[in-house]
Amino acid sequence: MLEKLTWSWQWFVLLAGIVSLYGVFIYRYAKNELIRLQPISFLLGCLLIFLMLGSPFTTLSQVSITLHMIQMSVLFFFVPPLLQLGIPPSLFDGMARWLKRSKLSSMHLSPTTSLSIFAILFLFYHTSIILTFLVSRPVVHTGYLLLLFLLSFGMWKPFASPDPLLRLCACKMKRYAFLSGLAITPACLLFIASGFFEGATNPLALQLLAHLCGPDFMDSFSLLPAPFHTKHDRILAGVLMMVLHKSSLVVTLKLERNISSVFYEKLERDCWKD
């Protein structure tokens, strides 16, 4: 088991390339308007991707449902807003113009639609039938998670769009945050309920472990503390998802206000002039 706890150089090279391109585009097109926190936000988003997908945590997340849900929560609730807030408006405008010229613009979904589809697929992912189907088909499983990841960018747009004009005002942000919490809650409650009613002998947990990790990993529960390999695993997973989602909202809103403070001050001055 311990020999499987390795770092992925493929993810390192990929993310290093993305960060390098980000630096080049920033220097050429947006260095005059770059806010100090934006590179930090973008780099932190890339770092979280690497830690969740390219570090030994990836292997550990395949052993415990709780750790797997922590991985998903970080990828869907923290990474998208951090990456979006790290993109300056002028760079985003260039990307938007390129998308309009391509066929990808026809695939654009509204934030509410993205949130609704994400919530439905996220709930389905936590049902025994769907999860059993996915873990036995790695390619489909990866595609399903990739779709959730792409939808998460759309659902975070009202909070973290690179263009401040596309974000919601403060009062509407609170309402959308409440709706976002409601949309995520059913999946969390499903996990908590399954922990109470199915318990530690749930065959799905063993099947998930066998498909994701292989038979040589079946004794790897011993590497984790008790809550991760008892009936409390699912309960803890559901609770942590709710906590992490709420935490991501708080972090995103505070970071958004700090990054866009200059924009809001200018907007307020213009309003007073009018």
Image (cartoon, grey):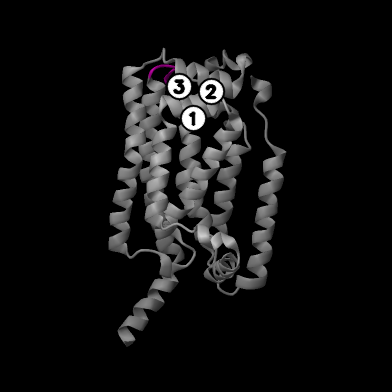
Q: Which residue is mark 3?
A: 228
Q: Quadrant of the C terminus?
A: bottom left
Q: What amino acid is labelled 1 in the image?
A: Leu
Contact flag, marks 2 and 1 (Cβ < 8 Å) = yes
Q: Which residue is mark 2?
A: 63
Write the residue at 47% across / 49% down. 151
Q: Quadrant of the N terminus?
A: top right
The dot on residue 67 is 1
**Magenta span covers which residues?**
226-231
Q: What is the chief secondary structure element of the magenta stretch?
A: helix
User: Relative to residue 121, is residue 22 depicted above or below?
Assistant: below
Write the residue at 38% across / 27% down. 236
Write the residue at 55% across / 73% down. 33
What is the spatial separation of the Cα atoms under label 1 and label 3, in whole angstroms? Answer: 8 Å
Q: Is residue 46 left or right of residue 246?
A: right
Label 1: which secondary element: helix
Contact flag, marks 2 and 3 (Cβ < 8 Å) = yes
- Choose the circle earlier in sequence order: 2 or 3: 2
Q: What amino acid is labelled 2 in the image?
A: Val
What is the spatial separation of the Cα atoms under label 2 and label 1, in whole angstroms? Answer: 8 Å
